[in-house]
Image (cartoon, grey):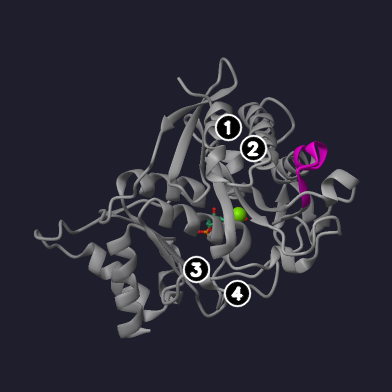
């Protein structure tokens, strides 16, 4: 049984200039994930479910667990001094960590501390998503906005924690995707899924079909394609939509499938955030042999201009993402 900590240390050679900083940084994320996991498991017993009565910077209602997870991840990253700055879906602006040790660190972290908030109160799977970049500003100076506004193809690591029927941490450093399952009695993550691969073709499509009438024609036609009977291509496909990106992505990664959150008239760039949700998932998808686009373009090549920028998102099995792209080209 290999623990997450042992695995990360064993793989340090993948970073030629490894100083242990990155290993400790992943250790901070692992620690905060365990703290958040413990609190999530108590939801319903302690006063942690429900809304805070506040809105985040994007005008979305904040849940108590959103705020709790945000504080815990920030605190863990700040305390260990291995990052010079953090930005999260819950913060208006990026945060600079300014101690001497922090400002000499090479990395910035971008996160969605608790994704799928609408599922918190009903005991349905939620997640944490993280993304790590090497800073571009000089080491020793305060982090700058440019450190955070890098395209996804510059990520050095990305991952998620899925708080499901078991808790898993899945990450990539650009050398495949590896999954670790938490043994709740010990509070230790053990390697359970090494080198995860998304099947090139699946039979699950995941989309909030309640928005059907608002979708672009390409997506509407693709949904109809998924629902048609065809023996050769094993259609109709199965529809599965949890409403937690991490959970929908994780299932599709294991079983094969495509997740879609397209644009629609009232939300021309869709709902999901490029920096906190789409880039890390796109990096993981590609590392597992899958794909991620906005319907046309590779997600990882989009140059961001805003911290909270959104993008339409199509992600999962390679052939299915390509097929959605074909429908978008033809009909939208
Ligand atoms: P959140 O970060 O506010 O939780 O929103 C992101 C979530 C994703 O996890 C999920 O796939 C999507 O929003 C669901 O949105 P909808 O309810 O519109 O289908
Ligand atoms: Mg989110």
Please give the residue where the numbered disc 3 appears in the rendered image: 299
Circles 2, 1 touching at the beta carbon (< 8 Å): yes
- Across and down, in percent, residue 205 comes to 33, 57
In reply to whether residue 116 is colored magenta, the answer given is no
Q: Is residue 264 left or right of residue 240?
A: right
- Across and down, in percent, residue 223 comes to 31, 67
Q: CA distance from mark 2 to mark 4?
A: 28 Å
Circles 1, 3 touching at the beta carbon (< 8 Å): no
Work out which residue is located at the far left of the displayed protein and give it.
231
Please give the residue where the numbered disc 2 appears in the rendered image: 23
Mark earlier in primary sequence (1, 3): 1
For discs 1 and 4, the disc positioned in front in the rendered view: 1
Q: Nearer the viewer, residue 77 or 234?
A: 77
Q: CA distance from mark 1 to mark 4?
A: 32 Å
Q: Residue at x 54, y 64 (%)?
A: 153
Q: CA distance from mark 1 to mark 3?
A: 30 Å
Label 2: which secondary element:
helix
Please give the residue where the numbered disc 4 appears in the rendered image: 303
> How many residues crowd mark 1 within 10 Å: few (<14), some (14–19), many (20+)?
few
Q: Nearer the viewer, residue 176 or 213?
A: 176
Magenta range is 76-84
Label 2 CB-ligand 2 distance < 8 A: no
Please give the residue where the numbered disc 1 appears in the rendered image: 9
Q: CA distance from mark 2 to mark 3?
A: 27 Å
């Amino acid at each position: 049984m290999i623990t997450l900590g042992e695995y990360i240390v064993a793989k340090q050679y993948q970073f030629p200039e490894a100083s242990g900083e990155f290993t400790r940084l992943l250790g901070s994320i692992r620690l905060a994930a365990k703290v958040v996991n413990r609190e999530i498991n108590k939801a319903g017993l302690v006063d942690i479910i429900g809304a805070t009565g506040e809105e985040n910077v994007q005008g979305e209602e904040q849940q108590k667990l959103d705020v709790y997870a945000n504080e815990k991840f920030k605190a863990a990253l700040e305390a260990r001094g291995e990052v010079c700055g953090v930005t999260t879906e819950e913060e208006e602006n990026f945060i600079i960590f300014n101690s001497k040790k922090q400002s000499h660190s090479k990395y910035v972290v971008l996160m969605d501390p608790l994704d799928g908030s609408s599922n918190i109160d009903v005991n349905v799977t939620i997640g944490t998503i993280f993304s790590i970049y090497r800073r571009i500003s000089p080491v020793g100076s305060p982090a700058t906005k440019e450190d955070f506004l890098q395209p996804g193809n510059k990520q050095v690591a990305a991952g998620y924690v899925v708080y499901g029927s078991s808790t898993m941490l899945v990450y990539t450093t650009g050398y495949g995707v590896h999954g670790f399952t938490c043994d709740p009695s010990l509070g230790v993550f053990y390697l359970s899924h090494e080198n995860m691969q998304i099947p090139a073709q699946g039979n699950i499509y995941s989309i909030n079909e309640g928005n059907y009438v608002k979708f672009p024609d390409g997506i509407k036609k693709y949904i109809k394609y998924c629902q048609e009977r065809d023996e050769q291509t094993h259609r109709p496909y199965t529809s599965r939509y949890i409403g937690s990106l991490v959970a929908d992505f994780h299932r599709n990664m294991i079983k094969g499938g495509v997740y879609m959150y397209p644009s629609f008239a009232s939300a021309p760039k869709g709902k999901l955030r490029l920096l906190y949700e789409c880039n890390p998932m796109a990096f993981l998808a590609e590392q597992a042999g899958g794909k991620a686009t906005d319907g046309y373009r590779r997600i990882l090549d989009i140059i961001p201009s805003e911290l909270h920028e959104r993008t339409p998102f199509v992600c999962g099995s390679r052939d299915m993402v390509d097929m959605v792209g074909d429908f978008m080209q033809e009909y939208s």
